[in-house]
Image (cartoon, rainbow, N blue to C red):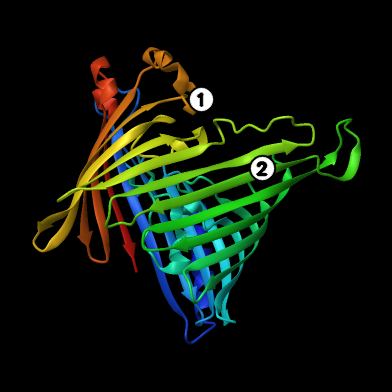
Amino acid sequence: MKMIKKLSSTAAAFIFTLTTLSAAASFNGYGGLKGDLKSKENSEFFDPIMNLTGFFQGQFNFSENLFFNTEMSISTDDVIDTKLTEDTQAVFCFDELSLTYIKNFLGATQFFSIFKGTYTPLGANQFLSQQFGISPINSFITDSFYGNKCVSPYSINGFGLSYSIRLNSSPIAFAGYFYKNNDNPDDLRQFNLDFRFATTRKYLTLDFLGGIGFPSKNKDKNDDDVILLVDEIYLHSGMNLLIGNYYTTSLFLQAGFSSLPVKKSNAKIEISDEQLFLLVEPRFHLKNSQMHISFFNIPDNQNEKIEFADGNLGFNVNIFTENFFIRNKNIKFGFSTSFSYEERYLKDLPNLKDFYKDTCSVKTSPYIVIPVLSGDLSLMFQAKLSEFPAGKWKQNINFTLGYKSYF
């Protein structure tokens, strides 16, 4: 906890110093914090614990052309056991640090950035928001309090440079990234070169990102020292696609893969289950409500961040209304139910009979979102119904209270 306080003090001092560099400096941000109340797994009765998860994104505008972005996140152990005000074990991280210069030139808006950390991930819709000022298009079931470390088909994570350009005459944007990657599966030094294309129309929104990774080794196959050896490359790609818009029946598609190795000797390139991310979501607009049906195949390293499902393969049904009013406040109320299988993937679908041997995880989540001040207060109750017949209902219920706000 002392380390967290020191880091927070250092960050605050750094931010204060930066903001004093310009008399025209301004600040805006976005943040969220949630608490999960549940029971200890091995307890015979409801023995409550509460973990806190939160993030903070801040943008410091030194002028109309120069701004600094930062994101911080925190995740704590049980705060009930430490009586909330005592020292609590926690993980604190700077998820992003970036500096961007904007210049209008030759009928286009150009962005030059240097960044470190997780930068404009597909799952967070930051690139679309920055370039076109639109609301997020991502799925409800991938929404979280993880900030940049959210569920995403692919995320840029490292230290490097980026250049993006948006045409002033048309809603089209291009971007390029060159960076030292932090996510090499073999912990090798790797440099990535990525390209991005995005556009938004009345009935179409697209954000596509793809690139190549060049891992380097200092030993050859005979374990002899070499200055530089690149004997394989890694491919990665991801996309968000919305056909339709928020006000119509639409189809949302999120897909991607990461760290696909390609060697000279490879006769066939295959994407493994651990690399493939796929979410297909038809969205239906009814008279006074909406219904989203999500079919998903989520890798192990991503599904643990999804609050509404436990498995890798399955589907979720989310029925909600935004036409519920209390004292002139537009309240969102919904009911989400997921059916999923752990360690099952798309390749297993031809053998459906094998699924009967496994336990289908059934998770239901009624929720309500209430506008409060400049943000939204969310309350949710979750129950893993598939565990109730075994008498484990106390260990499989969860109460969540969260708040997100712009400022």
Label 1 residue SS: helix
Tell me how far mark 1 sits from mark 2, CA to CA. 25 Å
Residue ID at (45%, 48%): 150
Of tags 1 and 2, the one toward the viewer is 1
Residue at which label 2 appears: 184
| Residue 339 position in % (x across, y down) | 32, 28
Other-residue count near label 1 (Cα within 10 Å), few / some / many at <14 / 14–19 / ≥20 = few
Q: Is residue 156 visible?
A: yes
Tell me the amino acid under the disc marked 1.
Lys
| Residue 38 position in % (x across, y down) | 29, 34
| Residue 129 position in % (x across, y down) | 43, 64
Q: Residue 310: which quarter of the image? A: top left
Tell me the amino acid under the disc marked 2.
Asn
Q: How many marks?
A: 2
Other-residue count near label 2 (Cα within 10 Å), few / some / many at <14 / 14–19 / ≥20 = some
Residue at which label 1 appears: 347
| Residue 243 position in % (x across, y down) | 38, 52
Nearer to us in this view, 241 or 96: 241
Quick check: marks 1 and 2 in contact, CB under 8 Å? no
